[in-house]
Image (cartoon, rainbow, N blue to C red):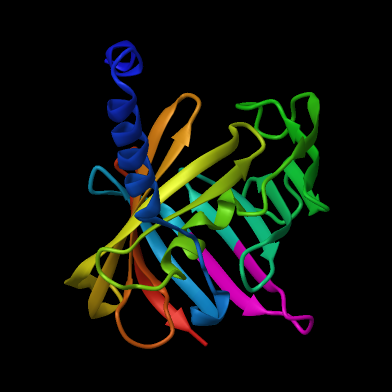
Amino acid sequence: MMKLLFVGSVAAALLLGSARQTEKSKLERATPNAKRLKPGRFRYRTLVNGKDAGNSDISVRETGSGQFAFRNPVSGQFSQRWEAIATGTFVPISAKLTFGDGANGPTGFALRYQGGRVTGFATKRGSGGTGDRLQIDAEITPDTVDQRIDWAAAMSEELAAGREFAFRVFDPYAGSSRVTGHVEGTEPVRVPAGAFTGVRVVYRIEKAGGPETYQVLTNAEGPRMMLKEEFPNGAVTELVEAKE
């Protein structure tokens, strides 16, 4: 198909370029704003194929310097702890992952973002933080979000139904990946924490190993909190309790 288009007339080439520009214009540069999020602690349960797979306890807080700190100790099948610090517009500052239930478990990776680059290290994937350390030093684009908090960035967008957005995420194992997403309309959401009117945000990460689609549901009114997340592997997290 591409060869046929390229050998066609100049007019056809111009039409193709115009169509591509129209398609591109639908995707707006991401404008996430962490101040739209509800600060506090949020306890979740994780289900895999409808069965309990553990719990997570996400905290969101604004620091004295205007940065936002996200932390999440995860217990059960996916036992780990991660933290990420970013600006109010989700410009990444640092990220860290450790394995196990305790705070001093083996470190999976530690990243520092500064001056358009990300540096740090990551242990070999699948080693549980005990493998050889691989050094990381890579250039990143200005629209990069640390992948630990892609869900928070996505639901911090303007939640107008039909709105499309794009940004990039960085992960020490997958590298830099493009993200495209859109906002769907409101829908009823029932989770252990209660019943809500929610907004569904769907985003797709174009990883080198294949695309991954995530769906996040947040409350339609008031400061936003994640009510539910649906993962590409079939896992689902649901809000159990929210605390200030």
In which quadrant of the rendered view does residue 145 lie?
bottom right
Q: What main secondary structure does the magenta stretch of the protein show?
A: strand
Q: Is residue 187 above or below residue 128?
A: below
In which quadrant of the rendered view does residue 140 lie?
top right
Q: How many marks?
A: 0
**Residue plotted at (26% across, 15% down):** 1
Residue 64 falls within the magenta-colored stretch: yes
Q: Is residue 13 above or below residue 75?
A: above
Residue 6 in the image, given as x and y percentages of width and height: 35, 17
**Residue plotted at (34% across, 55% down):** 26
Q: Nearer the viewer, residue 130 or 139?
A: 139
Residue lying furthest front: 10
Residue 104 in the image, given as x and y percentages of width and height: 76, 52
In the image, 95: left or right of 20? Answer: right
Residue 208 in the image, given as x and y percentages of width and height: 50, 26
In the image, 211: left or right of 123? Answer: left
In which quadrant of the rendered view does residue 3 lie?
top left
Q: Is residue 60 above or below residue 205?
A: below
Residue 105 in the image, given as x and y percentages of width and height: 72, 46
Magenta range is 56-71
Residue lying furthest left: 188
In the image, 87: left or right of 190? Answer: right
**Residue plotted at (39% across, 47% down):** 24
Q: Nearer the viewer, residue 71 or 65?
A: 65
Residue 13 falls within the magenta-colored stretch: no
